Image (cartoon, rainbow, N blue to C red):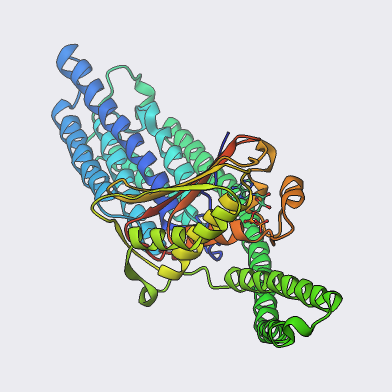
Amino acid sequence: MRCDLRKPTEPIPAASSQFVSAASLRTRLVWFDKLRWGAAAGVLGITLIAGLGLKAPLETRGLLLTGAVLVILNTVYTVRNWRFPAVDLGIELRLVKVQMVGDLLTLTILLNLSGGVENPLLFLYIIHVIIASLLFKGREIFQIAWLAIILFTAEVLGEYLGILPHHHLPVAGAAGHQLPFILMTLGSFWLVILFSAYIGALIMKHNRAIKDELVARQADLLGEDRAKTDFFRFVTHEIKNPVNTAQSGVETALELGGEDLSPSVRDVLERSVSRLKQATVIVRDLADLTRGGILKEENLALVDCNQLVAGVVDAHKDAAARAGLTMSMLLPDPPVTLTTIESMLETIVTNLVGNAIRYNREGGRVSVRLVDTGKRVRLVVEDEGIGIPRDEQQAIFDEFYRSTAARDKTNLGTGLGLSIVKKFVTALGGFIEVESAVGKGSTFTVTLPRKSRRKRRPMF
Ligand code: ADP
């Protein structure tokens, strides 16, 4: 069974538009580019078939030229979207407004060349208003709606008054030249455009309210999470020294007492040492857990992973031998290096190898492999132990989770190790996967990038 844990929790950026990031706006823009390709293909295709193929009396040259301009503009937009990553939502929104003005102008020119008010395609303006309502807020949607109204009204009246040339649409009747028909068409056009803008703005306002509420709730949750972390950090800091002092005190008493201690006193002291060791593990895990998960450039260093993994495996040799386990290790040649935070990486390897030993079976095997895949490095820790049931494979990464089977096997454990591993792996820009079968064993695979980077936060 495989369980993928690649989804870190990113904070939703603050309210400001319906887009949570410049990247999400960009996704929509790519879709609009496709629509524009469709429109350009339609203009060029229909003109070529009707104008050149069927020899219909169309303004073929003008229509082909406008279609070509649309193709050139859309090529520029597409190449930009493809080559330059979206960083600033404000800039992206301004650019999309410019594109939209260009689209409305192009549509007006196309209509002028193909009958003006006689052309039923005049309702294509509505599509622009709907698109504007997906992208902008209330006032801006109406700006686009009014621009559509002004352009089309100017075009129709310009033609009627003889200011602009009129290119009669071959299939249209004579009604297109009558003032009552023109005014009726313009009236219904204004109504539909403004109503579309109103409905679009209303729907998007509702969506924004939902998004803003989600942002506020997430901020609350993050605040509570921070308070919890601060509390853990405080407790571990305050507890560490007394626990260490008590442990070394009892160990010294055991040493000094030597043979003079009665068996019952020795037994009490030895059990105290064992409990204090458990407390030390808990304090260490809590300290790791409350460590900042955010990467700071200054903590990054070039780390020899072969050396690090070999060191951790070596440190666990005695424990493995005591548990009757065989350990094997396979490292890449030449050695692989990562730009990462060494202490975090060491904790990841230590916790995984420690678990592979702890949850193994008598005579079992632990294999540690490091694989260089070029862009990434993969650490695979495999054991032949108790395994993890499928329905627990997500939960084992939760803080303080310990399965019943694990509790039966050993009481040495806090249930924090894997949540620390997941947190560190995510902070280093990687991900962790687990594959396991009950009674057969488990394989934990950590994949890390060559260079850990701080994640770029969206600006909005
Ligand atoms: P701990 O080992 O201190 O209990 P972890 O967070 O490291 O805490 O592990 C959480 C739980 O995941 C363990 O209690 C155990 O149930 C399960 N687990 C972790 N590693 C293994 C493994 N290699 N084999 C079987 N179960 C495992």
Question: Residue placed farthest to the right in the image?
Answer: 264
| Total marks in image | 0
The answer to whether any part of residue 139 appears in the image is: no
* Viewer-proximal residue among 215 and 158: 215
* Viewer-proximal residue among 347 and 74: 347
- Residue at the image point whose x is 64% and y is 73% from the top: 226
Question: Residue placed farthest to the front in the image?
Answer: 259
Q: Position of residue 381 (x, y in %)?
A: 48, 47
Q: Position of residue 63 (x, y in %)?
A: 20, 31
Q: Quadrant of residue 322?
A: bottom right
Q: Position of residue 165 (x, y in %)?
A: 21, 36
Q: Quadrant of residue 28?
A: top left
- Residue at the image point whose x is 69% and y is 60% from the top: 413
* Viewer-proximal residue among 130 and 30: 30
Q: Position of residue 286 (x, y in %)?
A: 64, 71
Above-or-below relation of 224 to 100: below
Judged left or right of residue 39, residue 288 is right
Judged left or right of residue 355, residue 149 is left
Above-or-below relation of 143 to 120: below
Question: Residue placed farthest to the top in the image?
Answer: 54
